[in-house]
């Protein structure tokens, strides 16, 4: 393999790894930027998306957990991967609406520490509930048959077809959310409410419904991330927590509330992580993304595309 092929392979794998961070971070960023709500349960929505995707796509054997003790040997309805891509975001969107209405809304005017505590506690409850019911062992999430196997790319050679699928799905979804926020009346109301909510309310526009939808969209993106990210690694109750920290780093590096920033930061983190892994420094891959975050924040405390906040 030539040096150019090595570089392109690292870039493609970095794009794929970064795509998962982007899907999580875009939802996290618009919730944090619009509602000023610190949602540490975002990783739990990714976790729910992954397990729900498993349930919809096929039959998963149960070897331990409470359901196995009750004599249930497997779970799943076997509708296939495309059905999971359609159903999971809808279900997680509804979960997001319920979460906003019955949990988050009561904490909008509370300190960040209260928001962190309640959402982190919620994430732990979801994680341990799934562990108790389904067991703590890892479950393989099969790739869709129409996207399994390698595809021959110029210069690069064979490359996993599903990794390209993850990049494509992420690009379509992020462009759709960006267009919704930037070019529709709904997005303009949300942006205006973020800048001056009191003025928007004085104009007779209720912000509670747009904010509710924003929360649902962010949740749905996390659910999709769970479905498309599931086949890249085994699914277990810890994956939500494992993805949460890189997602928050992506938001902080890119700038809170900036979709473009989340995309740039996610791709930077993904590429750096893959570069370290594929050059023999896998043990430093986690350290590397923290170091990158620290470096960016030293130079631009507001993130790459974030705006400075006047605290005077």
Image: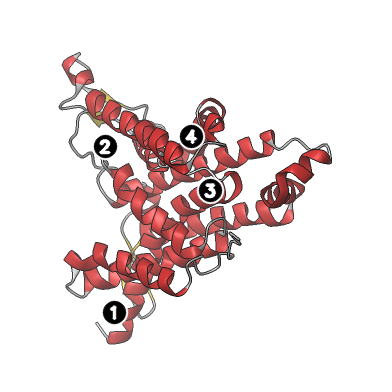
Viewer-nearest residue: 275 or 188: 188
Indicate the secondary structure of the residue bearing disc 3: helix
Q: Are marks 2 and 4 in contact (CB under 8 Å)?
A: no
Q: Which residue is mark 1?
A: 6
Local secondary structure at mark 4 = helix
Q: Nearer the viewer, mark 3 or mark 4?
A: 3
Marks 2/4: CA distance? 17 Å
Tell me how far mark 1 sits from mark 2, CA to CA: 34 Å
Kindly indicate whether the residue at mark 2 contacts the one at mark 1 (C-beta within 8 angstroms).
Answer: no
* Residue receiving disc 4: 92
Q: How far is mark 4 from mark 1, CA to CA?
A: 38 Å
| Camera-side mark, 3 or 1 | 3
Question: Is mark 3 in CB contact (under 8 Å) with mark 4?
Answer: no
Q: Residue at x 73, y 56 (%)?
A: 183
What scheme was used to colour the molecule? secondary structure
Indicate which disc, 2 or 4, sits on the residue closer to the N terminus.
Answer: 4
Percent x, y of residue 277: 22, 68
Residue at 51% from the left image edge and 53% from the top image edge: 26
Q: Earlier in the sequence, mark 1 or mark 2?
A: 1
Q: Using residue 214 as the reference point, say whether residue 126 is left or right of it.
A: left
The N terminus lies in which quarter of the figure? Answer: bottom left
The residue under label 3 is 32
Estimate the spatial distance between the alpha carbons at disc 3 and disc 1, rounded to whole Å: 37 Å
> Mark 3 and mark 2: span between their CA atoms?
25 Å
The tag earlier along the polypeptide, 4 or 1, is 1
């Amino acid at each position: 393999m030539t040096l150019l092929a090595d570089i392109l392979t690292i870039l493609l794998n970095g794009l794929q790894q970064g795509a998962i961070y982007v899907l999580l971070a875009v939802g996290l960023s618009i919730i944090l930027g619009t509602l000023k709500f610190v949602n540490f349960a975002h990783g739990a929505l990714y976790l729910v998306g992954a397990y729900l995707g498993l349930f919809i796509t096929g039959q998963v054997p149960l070897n331990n957990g409470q359901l196995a003790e009750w004599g249930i040997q497997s779970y799943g309805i076997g509708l296939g991967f495309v059905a999971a891509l359609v159903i999971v975001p809808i279900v997680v969107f509804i979960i997001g609406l319920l979460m906003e209405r019955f949990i988050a809304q009561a904490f909008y005017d509370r300190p960040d520490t209260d928001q962190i505590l309640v959402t982190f506690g919620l994430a732990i409850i979801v994680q341990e509930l799934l562990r108790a019911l389904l067991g703590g062992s890892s479950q393989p999430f099969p790739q869709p048959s129409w996207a399994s196997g390698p595809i021959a790319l110029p210069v690069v050679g064979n490359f996993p077809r599903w990794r390209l699928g993850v990049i494509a799905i992420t690009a379509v979804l992020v462009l759709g959310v960006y267009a919704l926020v930037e070019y529709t009346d709904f997005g303009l109301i949300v942006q205006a409410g973020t800048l001056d909510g009191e003025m928007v309310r004085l104009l007779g526009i209720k912000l509670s419904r747009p904010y509710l939808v924003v929360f649902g969209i962010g949740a749905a993106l996390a659910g999709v991330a769970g479905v498309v990210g599931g086949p890249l690694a085994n699914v277990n109750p810890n994956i939500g927590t494992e993805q949460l920290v890189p997602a928050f780093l992506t938001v902080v590096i890119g700038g809170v509330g900036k979709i473009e920033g989340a995309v740039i930061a996610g791709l930077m983190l993904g590429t750096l992580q893959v570069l370290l892994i594929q050059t023999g420094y896998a043990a430093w891959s986690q350290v590397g993304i923290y170091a990158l975050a620290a470096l960016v924040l030293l130079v631009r405390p507001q993130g790459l595309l974030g705006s400075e906040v006047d605290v005077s």
